[in-house]
Image: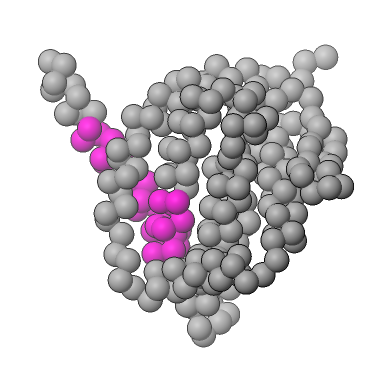
Amino acid sequence: MFKLYRLTDLIINLCRWPAAILLLLSIPILLQTYGYFNYATFKFYSFFGGIALFVATVIFAGTESRQSLQIVAHELTHSFFALLTLHSVHHIRLNPDGTGGSMQLMGGNWLIILAPYFFPLFAFFYMLIMPYIYSLVESVWILHGILGYLTAYYWATVISQIHPQQTDIIRSGYIFSAIIILAMNLYMTGCIFAYNNNLWHGLTLYHKTLYKLGLKDLHYILNLIA
């Protein structure tokens, strides 16, 4: 019997290198957008304060519980993207020695495999509820601090889990993985910065900026070809 996840796997895997090439070409545009943010605001001061708090906890607190939670976040992100692409997750397992984990599903695609290396799962779910909390608290700077903390946690998780022996990266290929992870992390971080600046409206403006810069670069390339 035909399974719908097979269709999504086929489409996503066919888009493998077109997506990589598009993201590779987008890197200069993504870097350019970082110059458009106004970092001298209380929102960003609070955001960077949250990052500093995370760094302090890494320095002064133990690492075992943090590493275990990073493994949980890793496997949950695999599972989240599996569900988004219409797969059924049969189980999630963590190694007793804390060295890693695994999840089982039928089929699979590169988006599921590489998602933990570019998608800030905890920050994403926090961003979904942050606007509702905004109206309930007086000291909203705390909310931006929490977002900064979760973002730093996400960065630390990605950095700690990228290495040449990482099976997900080996399965996807080093060159392909490098392009996807680099470009998508630039994009996701830009999204977080934009959201921190003005919540969902900031995210909308960020994508409009990406679109305009992309059209500008495309127009420039076409003029060179003509």
Q: In terms of depth relative to the viewer, which is nearer, 136 or 44?
A: 44
Q: Is residue 34 toward the left or the right of residue 106 in the image? A: left
> Colour mode?
one colour
- Residue 210, position in %: x, y? 32, 43
Q: Is residue 25 left or right of residue 177?
A: left
Residue 222 image point, x, y percent: 18, 21
Which quarter of the figure has residue 90?
A: top right
Q: Is residue 101 visible?
A: yes
Magenta stretch: includes residue 161: no
Residue 69 lies, with reference to residue 16, above or below; the image says below
In the rendered view, tell whether residue 207 sits above or below residue 109.
Answer: below
* Figure quadrant of the C terminus: top left
**Residue name at image x 16 percent, y 16 percent:** 225
Q: Is residue 201 magenta?
A: yes
Q: Magenta stretch: dominant SS?
A: helix
* Res. 102 image quadrant: top right
Q: Where 122 sits versus 96, above or below?
A: below
The range drawn in magenta is 189-217
How many numbered badges does the structure rendering display? 0
Foreground: 69 or 3? Answer: 69
